[in-house]
Each structure stands twice: as C-alpha cells, then as structure tokens.
Amino acid sequence: MTTDNKFRPQQYFGATRPIKNLGSSRDFVRIASLGGFGDVTQNLFVYEYFPSGNEAQSQIIIVDCGVGFPEDDAFGVDLQIPDTKYLEDRKNRILGIFITHGHEDHIGAIRFILPILGKSIPIFAPKIAAALIESRLQESQIRANLKVYQNGDLFNVGSFTVDPIRVNHSIPDTFHFAITTPIGIFYHGSDFKFDVFPLDGKPSDLAHIARVGEKKVVALLSDCLGADHEGFSPSESSIAEKFAVSPDTIRWQNNLTKDRIKVGDTLEILPVAGMAHKVQKGDTVYSIAKKYDAQAQAIVDFPFNTFTNDETFALAIGQTVIVPDGIKPAAAVYVARVRQITPDAGSVTASGIFVWPTSGTITQNFTWYHKGIDIANSAAPDVLATDAGTIKTAGWSPVGYGNHVIIDHGNGYRTLYGHLQTIYVVSGQTVNRGARIGRMGSSGHSTGVHTHFEVVKNGVYLNPLNVLK
C-alpha cells in the first residue's frame, strides 16, 4: 500500500481573549488541523494548551486520526495520511487520542501514525469505533492502549477534561466532545445529524449539548457537510439504504426469514452487497466465486480481503472473505443474474461521449473501491483509445494495474486501460479515437483476461458507463 502525506499543518489558532480566559492571562490554547480543511477526509485535530505561554510545558490531545483518499491524478497512491511532523517533535507531550466515531476518515490513520508517535498513547473510542480500530491494529500486529467510552463518561487528562456527547450519524456510536481547558470550553463537533428516529433508538443528547452551551464555550468547531442545503436530512431508518447494500445481503448474513426486526436486535452488516465466506480447506478465489455466482476479480479487488500470497491469491483456512455481489447458493435458483455484453469495440451509442475501448462482458462495475469497470473476453481482443489524446503513461504499474496506458484527452478527461498483455504505444505519442493501444491481458493484480477501464474528469472519477452508453 502506498500512502501520501499530502497536507501540511495549517495556521494555528490561539484562544487568548481575556473575556473568556479562566486561567492565567498568559495561558492559551492552540488548535491545528494536520489533515487540512475543506475535504471530507483526513481528520486529525490537535488541541495544545500552553500554561503561562510556556511552550516547553505544553500539553496535547488529538481528536480523530483518519486517512484521506487521493485525487484522480495521484495514480499509485492508495491513501493519504496527515503530516505528523509537528507532533513528532512533541510526542512526549501527547496525553491521548480521542475518537469521535468509526469512519475511516476518522480512524484509518491510527495504524500508520501510532508507531511513529508511540504505541503507549491511550486511545479513547466508542465501542464500535474501538472494535474497528482493534481489527485494523491486529492486521498490522500493533498492540495499543485502547480505552472504550460511552455517553456519560468524563475523562481528565492533564489540564484537559473531555466530555463525550452522543449524537447521530450514518454510523452508530458517534460523539461530539466538550473539551474543557484552563481558558474555557471548546466544543468539537464531528459529523452529525439530528435524527428523530435513529436506528439504535438513541437520539442525540440535546440536553447535554444545551448544558455545555450554558457554560459559554470559547469556540465551536463543527463539520459543515450539507449545512448549506435547506431542509432536513433523512432518517437512517432504512438499514439497507443506510449501508448501501441490498436487503438480501442483510437477510443472508443474519439468517433472517422475515424483514421485521426490533429494537435491541444485533445485525451484522457487510461493507458491500454480497456474501461473507469462511475459507475452508481447498477453497480458492475461483471456487468461492463459482459458489456464489460472483467474479474472482471482484474478490481480489475488494480492499479488505487479504491473501497469504498476493501473486497466487492463496487464502488462509478460517479467514473470512467478502464476495462482492455474491448470491446465497440456495437463492441462486430464483435470483436472475444479468451480465451486460458490450457493443463492438470502437462503436459509440447515441448518448455516449467515448467509443467503447474493447468488446466483451462487463464483469465488475464502478463502486467506491473499484473506480472503473472490468470488461472480460477470453479471446483477448485489442484495446482502443476511446478518444483522441496524448499518451501520458505506457508501461508497468507497481500498484496492481500491470501493463497499463493512461491517455490525456486535453479536455479535462483522462482514461486508463489496465491489465494489458501487450502495449502498442509509447509515452508522448498522440493517438486518434479508435487507435489500437494494446491487447487485453491479465497482467498485474488480475485473475483472468480482462481490461480495467477508468474515466476521470477534472480530478473526479466517473462511472465509465455514464460516458459510454
């Protein structure tokens, strides 16, 4: 996995106005976002208290520690992590890491940053986030000082008092923090919504928020995603819609025969629509894919599936493998599986912007973790440029694409063609629409002959089907 420390520390903010100064007139608090501002990723806030303005005696707590996701032009970069140089120089002053909830952009960087700052730093997290953190750390063979908190707990660390406040979000067990310092209270609000009908039956603790407000906080830091849209956010009452999976995925994973559930029931929710499979002796990605009427390449591409051998995709007995779009074997007889056949290579439909890069069967669609489509054809036909442009890259990719070509079309669009067995072009060459640029293959992180095709416009990944058909 390749990571990138994209952002540098932002301007620090000191809270020194005497009207709300409860300590020495020289005390102040510095707040820094080491993941930057303006993106829905890479959350890492530093609260640093300076008693009598003495930097050598400062005390630090960290709120959240998440990863970011790269822009489309950062080919080969899987994740971005906050720049911790400022903390590395002061790691002996860090009193704890406080986690608001379990989304990756709030917890995903812990496994990378904890070994740098010190594995003994206590991590305070709600139950669900703590379980996710523990799982990630176990994968990295890291033992941490993990402490679970719940609504009503109060933590005194150095000169800070951290008061967790329950709120609602798209993931249960989400909290805000009222952070009391010698100069006053800072209210740290991560992602939240006021859901009248939350799935877990635990609405936001508005009374708690009101009690904090009565104490006159020094500053409010709040996420504002969606704040510029009028109206109300919808309730998270539909479980399948909430987690962007199919109702069948929830039924199959929890052996439900009816859709009715009640408050207090515990459900296992897979990260994608499909099946979870516990590996038994003799299982391969190919046999598992066949069992669930799925694609082996989809199993390999799913980011949380791991292999004992990344070249052969060997599996360990007892491990759990996620099978995207898998169907329960007993249900396969009545669940119709429709696979799209592409038009001929080089053809363009009435609503299309580009010509089709090759011909075959679409075996994997565009998802949050698979930023393109896969077109498979055992005959290994040629692959065509979908529009005129300049070859920016033509060669081997170390991050899974194998032999691949990237074309800059000069109008904000870039296209990528992966897993080629042969490349017919070189970097810097100009090509016309429909020109042959290579031959379909199975190079790189691949389970069979196919072409992986991506479309990026002005830094944003697009579903290729939206510009092809």
Image (spheres, rainbow, N blue to C red):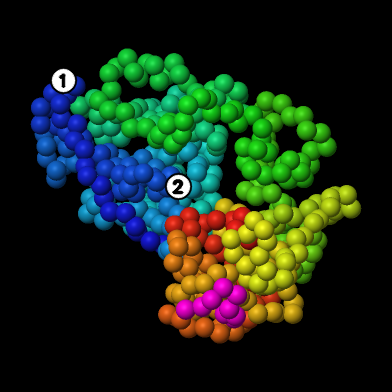
Residue 465 is marked as none
Say which of 219 and 434 sits in front: 434
- Looking at the rendering, the stretch of residues picked out in magenta corresponds to 430-438
Q: What residue is pinned by disc 1?
A: 19
Q: Please give the name of the residue rendered at 72% of the width and 71% of the height, measured from the top-left corner.
A: 344
Instruction: From the top left corner, tell me how far across and down residue 23 is, in percent.
Output: 16, 25
Judge whether residue 269 is colored magenta: no
Secondary structure under the numbered disc 2 in the rendered image: helix
Instruction: Kindly identify the amino acid type of the residue bearing the numbered disc 1.
Output: Ile
> Of the residues under marks 1 and 2, which one precedes in the sequence?
1
Q: Please give the name of the residue rendered at 43% of the width and 26% of the height, measured from the top-left corner.
A: 165
Q: Does any portion of residue 287 appear in the rendered image?
A: yes
Judge whether residue 432 is colored magenta: yes
Instruction: Kindly identify the amino acid type of the residue bearing the numbered disc 2.
Output: Asp
Q: Does any portion of residue 305 appear in the rendered image?
A: no
Instruction: From the top left corner, tell me how far across and down residue 242 is, in percent.
Output: 62, 37
The residue at the far front in this view is 350
Say which of 68 and 130 sits in front: 68
Secondary structure under the numbered disc 1 in the rendered image: helix
Q: Please give the name of the residue rendered at 56% of the width and 64% of the height, measured from the top-left corner.
A: 454
The residue at the far right in this view is 333
Residue 105 is marked as 2
Looking at the picture, does residue 277 appear above or below residue 387? above
Q: Please give the name of the residue rendered at 21% of the width and 42% of the height, measured from the top-left corner.
A: 12
Q: Residues within 10 Å of mark 2 (few under 14, many from 20)?
A: many
